[in-house]
């Protein structure tokens, strides 16, 4: 079932990166010794819903081979954009298959991810004030819990190694890899073999049946021995000193639940992009969204390097005192697969006496995919059921706004919530009204029809990017120039080859502006883009410039002396293709081929 609400469409679209900020909102220690003694009091609970297979099994019961790092083992790949761009090069039909299959199963560029290997350097993108901070050596040890379902092995192992490489060993109790019954080829058994052969601080465990991320995390947390729990998604890369500022806030106060800045790993190019400092909010359809910082916070010069309170969290990346996690009621085990648990935990933290913060000195990259690549075994969109549980347990009378948002029947069964209601009572949690007025005063109530005010997007604020050079793009073999099939303002217009204009409009409409962000903008209006097909033949098109590189980034390169125009996001080069009496521009494997010879005749 698909669930629509009026201000956000389908939750199957993966959740958005922090670059998509709403603007309708007006403002929008204990030592390791003590910790060991602590561990003795820890009584493992029973999880009737999770049966764990201790040993992964291969589909055909054959011996499972360890996964090999495609990049030179244990040497970090140097981070620079030109290397990264070239890593996407499709050289052979096999590369094309890896790329296509990767997009199909994982919704990101697995070809680049595999070639990056398990270690890569990252630019230290923290604020300078963070870089000079010194952290106490008396911080608690953390268990890092990473649940995964059918994750691409290179992305998963890069997540694990980034934690091992960038966390002081004395702060890392262990990494718990919870395999949520992945069923992709030999993935489970290969990961298990890799862990066994290479990683002594990592514990691999696998659920006997698919549980969904919520119950998988509960299982992991229950096995954890560190004093602090840190949850990460299975496609992250932690940055320099990421853990210390999180742990520091937890020893300041054990009820602080802390979230790093989630930087964006571009799904097409694997480039790391800095995220703006934003906080978590939600709309009345109970979808998480990013909000601008309230004005009074934004204007404070210290904000860039000091923790800032956040009404909600995105859900995947956070740290929390372990005993506090159990005290506060773990997660709602009645929630399935994906969605809603982030708001449930956020409301619960605030309403029951805790505090949720974003810690700007901690940065973790996350691959933001364009869609969620996995299904839920016919359970439909679990987000709806999970959200109904959130609304009925935590939102009091305000749940009516959620119900009114829905354009589908309201008789969906959301299971038994009596345990969670009892938990709320037991913890003497405050009302949702208190939460809204004290924690999220920026939130706007829907009108009497239950319709939330429309999200007003501001006029394009993007600064004009600097133009490096201008000129016609000439196909050197034919001497023809690249222009739009329709006029320069026509979005989605395909591109064709025509005689090169010598003057006037004819020439003006063939002039491309190459920017510092590697865009090619025709006549200062629309950007050269790739028709967004994940597989098969792709055409060049004119699209509105989006400013986030990817399909709109272009790199001039050479092969056997032939000048080619390469698009890192597709791993392919621009090509002249005859079709219905016209020469269209398409993409193909880069070759020193006459169809692909292009140059810019600089004005
Ligand atoms: C975001 C969160 C995610 C979770 C979700 C709402 C971030 C960066 N991500 O969506 O953590 O809070 O919102 O539920 O804040 N997984 C399983 N079993 C499953 C399905 C998923 O173990 O049945 C794993 C998956 O491999 C991944 C994690 O759970 O490691 C989160 O899933 P996602 O990456 O698809 O969620 P995302 O980032 O779209
Ligand atoms: Mn994720």
Image: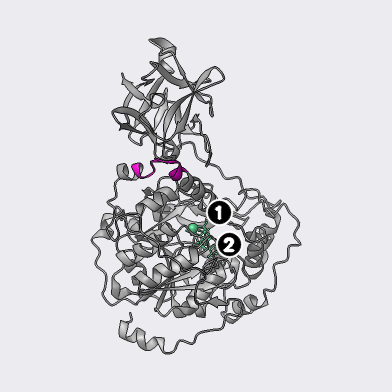
Which residue is under mark 2? 338
Foreground of the two, 384 or 441: 384
- Proximity of marks 2 and 1: CB atoms separated by less than 8 Å: yes
Find out if the beta carbon at label 2 lies less than 8 Å from the nearest ligand 1 atom: yes
State yes or no: residue 232 in magenta: no
Q: Position of residue 119 (x, y in %)?
A: 32, 58
Q: Residue at x 67, y 62 (%)?
A: 379
Magenta part of the chain? 86-96
- Quarter of the image where the C terminus is located: top left
Residue 406 position (above or below residue 44): above
For disc 1, the marked residue is 372
Eye-nearest disc, 2 or 1: 1
Left or right? Give the position of 537 relative to 261. Answer: right
Would the CB of label 1 be found within 8 Å of ligand 1? yes
Q: Earlier in the sequence, mark 2 or mark 1?
A: 2
Q: Quadrant of residue 417?
A: bottom right
């Amino acid at each position: 079932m698909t669930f629509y609400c009026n201000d956000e469409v389908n939750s199957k679209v993966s959740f958005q990166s922090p670059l998509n900020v709403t603007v309708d909102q007006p403002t929008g220690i204990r030592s390791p010794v003590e910790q060991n003694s602590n561990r003795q009091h820890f009584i493992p609970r029973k999880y009737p819903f999770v049966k764990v297979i201790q040993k992964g099994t291969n589909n055909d019961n054959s011996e499972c081979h360890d996964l090999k790092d495609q990049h030179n083992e244990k040497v970090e790949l140097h981070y620079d954009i030109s290397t990264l761009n070239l890593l996407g090069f499709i050289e052979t039909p096999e590369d094309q298959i890896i790329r296509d299959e990767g997009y199909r199963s994982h919704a990101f560029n697995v070809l680049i991810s595999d070639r990056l290997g398990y270690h890569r350097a990252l630019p230290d993108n923290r604020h300078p004030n963070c870089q000079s901070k010194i952290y106490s050596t008396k911080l608690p040890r953390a268990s890092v819990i990473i649940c995964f379902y059918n994750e691409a092995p290179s992305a998963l192992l890069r997540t694990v190694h980034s934690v091992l490489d960038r966390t002081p060993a004395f702060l890392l109790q262990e990494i718990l890899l919870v395999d949520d019954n992945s069923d992709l080829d030999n993935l489970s058994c290969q990961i298990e073999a890799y862990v066994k052969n290479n990683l002594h601080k990592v514990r691999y465990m696998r659920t006997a049946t698919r549980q969904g991320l919520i119950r998988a995390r509960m299982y992991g947390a229950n096995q954890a021995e560190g004093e602090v729990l840190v949850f990460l998604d299975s496609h992250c890369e932690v940055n320099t000193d990421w853990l210390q500022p999180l742990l520091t806030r937890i020893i300041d106060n054990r009820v602080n639940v802390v979230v790093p800045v989630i930087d964006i790993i571009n799904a097409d190019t694997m480039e790391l992009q800095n995220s703006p400092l934003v906080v978590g909010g939600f709309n009345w359809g109970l979808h998480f969204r990013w909000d601008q910082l309230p004005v009074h916070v934004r204007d404070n010069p210290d904000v860039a390097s000091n923790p800032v309170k956040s009404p909600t969290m995105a859900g995947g990346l956070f740290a929390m005192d372990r005993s506090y996690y159990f005290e506060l009621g773990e997660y709602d085990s009645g929630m399935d697969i994906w969605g809603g648990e982030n708001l449930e935990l956020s409301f619960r933290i605030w309403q029951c006496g805790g505090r949720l913060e974003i810690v700007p000195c901690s940065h973790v990259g996350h691959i933001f995919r364009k869609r969620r690549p996995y299904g839920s075994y016919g359970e439909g969109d679990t987000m709806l059921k999970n959200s109904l549980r959130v609304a009925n347990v935590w939102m009091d009378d305000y749940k009516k706004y959620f119900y009114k948002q829905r354009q589908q029947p309201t008789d969906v069964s959301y299971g038994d919530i009596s345990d969670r209601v009892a938990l709320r009572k037991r913890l003497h949690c405050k009302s949702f009204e208190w939460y809204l007025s004290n924690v999220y005063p920026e939130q706007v109530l829907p009108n009497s029809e239950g319709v939330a005010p429309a999200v007003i997007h501001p006029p394009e604020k993007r600064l004009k990017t600097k133009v490096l050079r201008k000129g016609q793009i000439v196909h050197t073999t034919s001497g023809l120039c690249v222009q739009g099939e329709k006029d320069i303002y026509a979005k989605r217009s395909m591109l064709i080859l025509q005689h090169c204009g010598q003057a006037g409009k004819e020439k003006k409409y063939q002039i491309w502006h190459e920017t510092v962000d590697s865009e090619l903008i025709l006549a200062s209006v629309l950007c050269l883009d790739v028709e967004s097909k994940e597989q098969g033949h792709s055409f060049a098109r004119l699209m509105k410039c989006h400013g986030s590189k990817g399909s709109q980034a272009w790199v001039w390169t050479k092969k056997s002396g032939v000048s080619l125009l390469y698009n890192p996001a597709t791993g392919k080069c621009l090509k002249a293709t005859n079709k219905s009496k016209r020469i269209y521009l398409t993409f193909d494997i880069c070759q020193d081929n006459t169809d692909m010879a292009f140059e810019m005749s600089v004005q």
